[in-house]
Amino acid sequence: MKAAMWQGISNITVGDVPDPWIVNSQDAIVKVTLTAICGSDLHLYNGLVPSMKKGDIMGHEFMGEIVEVGPGVKERKVGDRVVVAFPIACGACFFCRRELYSLCENSNPNAGMAEKMFGHALCGIFGYSHLTGGYAGGQAEYVRVPFVDIGTIVVPEQLSDEQVLFLSDIFPTGYMAAEACNITEGDTVAVFGCGPVGQFAVRSAFLLGAARVVAVDRFEYRLAAARRAGAETINFEDVDDVNDVLKDMTGGRGPDACIDAVGMEAHEPGAGAVYDYLMQTLRLEQDRAIALRQCILSVRNGGTVSIPGVYGGYADKLPIGSLMNRAITTRTGQTHVQRYLPRLMGHIERGEIDPGEIITHRVPLEQAAQMYQIFRDKQDSCLKVVMTPQNPSYT
Ligand SMILES: [Zn+2]
Ligand SMILES: [Zn+2]
């Protein structure tokens, strides 16, 4: 089969690899009908996530048709059309029973590697380095899906692939980030970063009852997409201090919650950015936590900072004094996607949100290399790329 593979920094190739096969009894094989490039794939592309190996198959956002199931699969069958959740979770362990699926303790065969880096292990994730299990990803014609009963949701016939694909990651990720803000009536939520996750954080904050959402970014096309969803916007390159603008907009108090939908590769003008860039390049600092710093400094006293943006290691110059003295709550975590699937599918079925509206680029899987570069470099107003594999018949 064909698959998009990591070959090194800024180097993705599409080539032939062996078809996947059933390894464990609760596995299924899914014929991928639609897959997407995620902002967090760019951290792999840019070489900022350790433990990638040449030839690793990329992709954790995908959906398709089940073509084979293992003998232990109970709830899914060949022919089912499913969206796959990006965290791999067993559904039965201490964490899964508490619906903390991205902390599953049974899905990461390389748990020891993650323990060394983070103190504790993480769940397995499709196509996201050997720290998270070294699983082959879904930017491919076929993929092995472990624990398929718990890790997928069946798609109602009347919904298109484009309407539901983002249940795999970015819609639940934006939603969990907004839910973590404990939004109550009249709240103002600021969303830093208007990439795909930021877009879903904006939309989810409104679904959860926010009165106002302020979206912050530096790219006009991304701010425009946030405005289409009802957000007010700030282009941080056009203002002296985002914090001052947010205060002006909120009666001097600051937003009730701030969402960092940027993560470790943030951009800012000025000397701080040079410092962080040098520290990160010299490997003295792994994460450029510029958006997170801004979220902490901007949120109102006693407010919440929610962090869906991906970080990998250690960050520098975190304003812990502001965080402590102003009684700020922080919430974070890889998304417990499985927990949100039925609820968010309901929002889509009722027409309350159309996730596919953020797609700007539709290409065959063969063009993966070029699309990674275009998406990373924010060319061609690229907000979200979906790719269609060819799917020759599975044997
Ligand atoms: Zn993703
Ligand atoms: Zn589990």
Image (cartoon, rainbow, N blue to C red):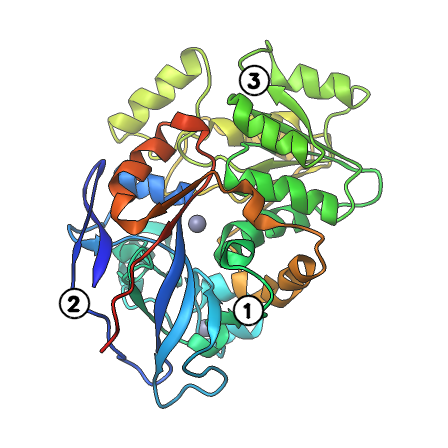
Can residue 311 be spotted in the picture?
Answer: no
Which residue sits at x=25%, y=48%?
366
Looking at the image, residue 170 sits to the left or right of residue 299; the answer is left
Can residue 219 be spotted in the picture?
Answer: yes
Amino acid tagged 1:
Val
Label 2 environment density (alpha carbons within 10 Å; few <14, some 14–19, many ≥20): few
Q: Where, by quadrant of the figure, is residue 155 drawn? A: bottom right
| Residue 380 locus on image (x, y percent) | 41, 27
Q: How far is disc 1 from disc 3 in space, using C-alphas?
A: 39 Å
Mark sitting on residue 18: 2
| Residue 128 locus on image (x, y percent) | 32, 53
Q: Nearer the viewer, residue 144 or 147?
A: 144
Amino acid tagged 2:
Pro
Label 3 environment density (alpha carbons within 10 Å; few <14, some 14–19, many ≥20): some
Q: Nearer the viewer, residue 152 or 255?
A: 152
Q: Are marks 2 and 3 in contact (CB under 8 Å)?
A: no
Element type at marker 3? loop
Q: Residue furthest bottom?
A: 71
Q: Which residue is mark 3?
A: 236
Q: Which numbered disc, 2 or 3, marks the residue that appears first in the sequence?
A: 2
Q: Which numbered disc, 1 or 3, marks the residue that appears first in the sequence?
A: 1
Q: Where, by quadrant of the figure, is residue 267 drawn? A: top left
Looking at the image, residue 94 sits to the left or right of residue 224; the answer is left
Element type at marker 1? loop
